[in-house]
Amino acid sequence: MTRAVRGLGWVLLVSGAVVLLYVVYLMWFTNLGTSQAQRDLAQAWEQQVAAPADAPVAGEQQDPADDEASDEDTVADPGDAYAMIWFERDGAPIVADEPLYVVSGVTLDDLRAGPGHYPDSAAPGEDGNLGIAGHRTTYGAPFWSLDELQAGDTIHVVDRDGREWVYAYREQRVVAPTDTWVVEDEDPLDLEAPTITLTTCHPRFSAAQRLIAWGELTSAGDEA
């Protein structure tokens, strides 16, 4: 009997160690990968936003095909840097200490690099609902503190043309994973204004529900 109890104790000890190692992997190693991905996105972003500055000199003739190429440059391929986002309260950063680079797409692979833009949702500043998803506990946990947003906070989004759009935080809710209307609805809060919807898992360390935070566009199109 004593030997059996001792054996059970060892099994539980080993199982606990395995679980602990798995948690360390999720919280540490996935964060390292995302940190590197964010650095890579930052470099790509600097090149993308700087590109429009190479405008033709006044009076210089320009090939119409160049306009088409310029428009194509502003469209992000899946996994590419799509936008930059940060949060402020009284001018100080909240939710994340540094700006986050948003990728195009919300697949599992996309979200390993950072927050992702729902492909069928609006573009920054566009009429409709701009949808962005982000992990809450792994892969950099960009939306770990999303639930701490409160009235008066602002959500800043810079698009690939370097224009900054400011959304005022409005409210948050916890919904079921099947409640896709939060990003599919063009005006989920009936604000009759462009909206941003941020989605993440809830509660922390669980995917049982979704935490949704909304904002309303209040400032548009300034050069960042």
Image (cartoon, rainbow, N blue to C red):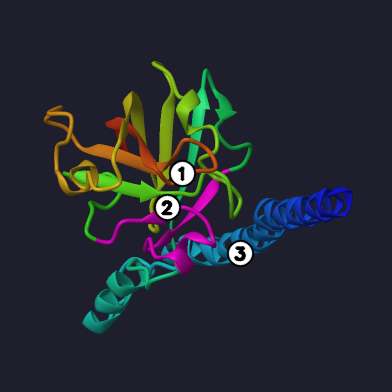
Picture mark count: 3
Which amino acid type is marked by label 3? Ala
Is 151 above or below relative to 23? above
For marks 3 and 1 on the same chain, the one whose residue lies earlier in the sequence? 3
Which amino acid type is marked by label 2? Gly
Q: Quick one: label 3, few (<14), some, or many (20+) residues within 10 Å?
A: some
Is 116 above or below relative to 151? below
For marks 2 and 1 on the same chain, the one whose residue lies earlier in the sequence? 2
- The answer to whether residue 109 is magenta is yes
**Residue at horizontal 73 percent and vertical 55 percent from the top:** 15
Q: Tell me which segment is drawn in magenta.
A: 99-119
Q: Are marks 2 and 1 in contact (CB under 8 Å)?
A: yes
Q: Are marks 3 and 2 in contact (CB under 8 Å)?
A: no
- The answer to whether residue 70 is magenta is no
- Tell me the residue that label 1 is attached to: 224
- Tell me the residue that label 3 is attached to: 37
Q: In the image as oriented, which residue stretches furthest toward the front?
A: 1
Q: Nearer the viewer, mark 3 or mark 2?
A: 3
Q: Give the image quarter of residue 185.
A: top left
**Residue at horizontal 30 percent and vertical 74 percent from the top:** 72
Residues 182 and 179: in front is 179
- Horizontal arrangement in the rendering, residue 219 relative to residue 101 (left or right): left
- Tell me the residue that label 2 is attached to: 162
